[in-house]
Amino acid sequence: MPDSNISFKNKWIPILALLVGMPWGYAQAQTIDSLRTDPIKRDSSYTQYDIGDLFNSIFHPKRKSTNPAKKSAVTIIPNFAYNPSIGAQIGIKAVAGKILGKDPHTLMSIAATSASITTKGIIYFYLNHNVYTPGNKWNLQGSLVAAKTVLPDFGLGIGKAATGSEADMILSNPGRKPYVLHAEYYNFREKIYKQVQPNLFLGAGVSFEIRRKIEDRANTSNALTPYNIYSDKYGFNRDHYQSNGLLFNLQYTTRDNQNRAYKGIYVDAGIRLNQTWMGSSKSAMQITTDFRKYWSLSSSNPEHVIAFWNWGSYLINGALPYLELPGTGRDTYFRSGRGYTVTYFKGPQYFYSELEYRFPITRNKFISGVAFGNIQTANDDLGTALFQEWQPGGGAGLRVLFNKATRTNLCLDYAFGKYGSKGFFLGLTEAF
């Protein structure tokens, strides 16, 4: 019979190793000295420790560490999240990553799906993908969303009071009085890119966004609110609308990983043309830009990264529905503007930038940290122009490595902004 005390100790050794940063699973096969002398092994994911390694170390201490390239690239977890926009969230989420084909230059394809419910009454389902075919000849990006939403609303613009009528003052909402809008939301988006030069893609696609049963349940007296004022001003139905259009994009990418890049850049510039013949409530032309740059600060520890992000959206002509205006958290994956709720600031033209420092904390890279700051500006068509007023935000957070094969992190951030805005943000994968 095995000694029960020895068995107990063996199960606690990996936990102690985790706390001091020792790559326990790898250390069973390689010595620490060999890691110091072989930078290739030290830099590889073999030396990293993720949730799967932790579970194996606790429940299967005699099992050998798995080659991360052969591990399952699918992460399935309970989807616990929190941020001031949605409240507390519970559900299930899956993130998958795989390199298609045998071309060593092919970028990793990513897919994710989630179904969840929140304490604020939001029910949300989505499925999205970013797929690169072998050799990166084609790139397919798309998403499908069905949701019952509860949207915080803080008015139009960047927080500066309008100088016109009472309606304009309510619309600009300088005191950031909170309103809440309930609605059903459906979205289908698909873009197909063709590689025309190494790392350079041209793409086109469609986007359909539908909102139904829009209401402010607290506004029983039908008083003026920013949503009602804007909808009436630009001729949108208060109860429902559609924002459907054609997408044309130019993309350039040299990122080494789509989930958590250590180096490279990503650029996507596009034109969106909302068309009434596609069912859109109004026609509009909109230009969007997305630029990301990553600098690794260490060859031996490439996880030390400075990351920069700029996202912008600019209405050229026509009109957009109020809830589809670009603004805080209105990027593709709703991750911008940490420190504020989604659409805290918004306008026909919007500009956002963020700088983040990422660094490992434990030697096995299981725990990492980040510190970040962001700034945003918007116009309001009420007297405040783009770049005239700015609003800052910032914070810090921890990262827990969930899947080293795909560099998938659990992200825990605390962020704050102006007007007393602050909150805890929890999610899977990096903000950008």
Image (spheres, helix red, strand yellow):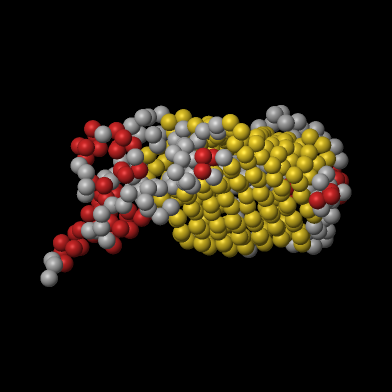
| Quadrant of the drawing holding the N terminus | bottom left
Q: Residue at x 57, y 62 (%)?
A: 115
Percent coordinates x, y for residue 173 in the rendering? 74, 44
Residue 222 visible, this angle: yes
Q: Residue at x 27, y 50 (%)?
A: 25
Front in this rendered view, residue 383 or 31: 31
Answer left or right for 289 relative to 215.
left
Q: Residue 316 is drawn in which quadrant?
A: top right
Answer left or right for 5 relative to 276.
left
Give the total number of marks visible in the rendering.
Answer: 0
Percent coordinates x, y for residue 228 in the rendering? 82, 52
| Quadrant of the drawing holding the C terminus | top right
Position of 87 relative to 382 (above/below): below
Position of 117 relative to 191 (above/below): below
Percent coordinates x, y for residue 104 in the rendering? 44, 39
Residue 227 visible, this angle: no
Residue lying farthest bottom?
1
Q: Residue at x 69, y 31 (%)?
A: 389
Answer left or right for 421 relative to 66.
right
Position of 322 relative to 181 (above/below): above
Front in this rendered view, residue 71 or 327: 71
Percent coordinates x, y for residue 217 in the rendering? 74, 62
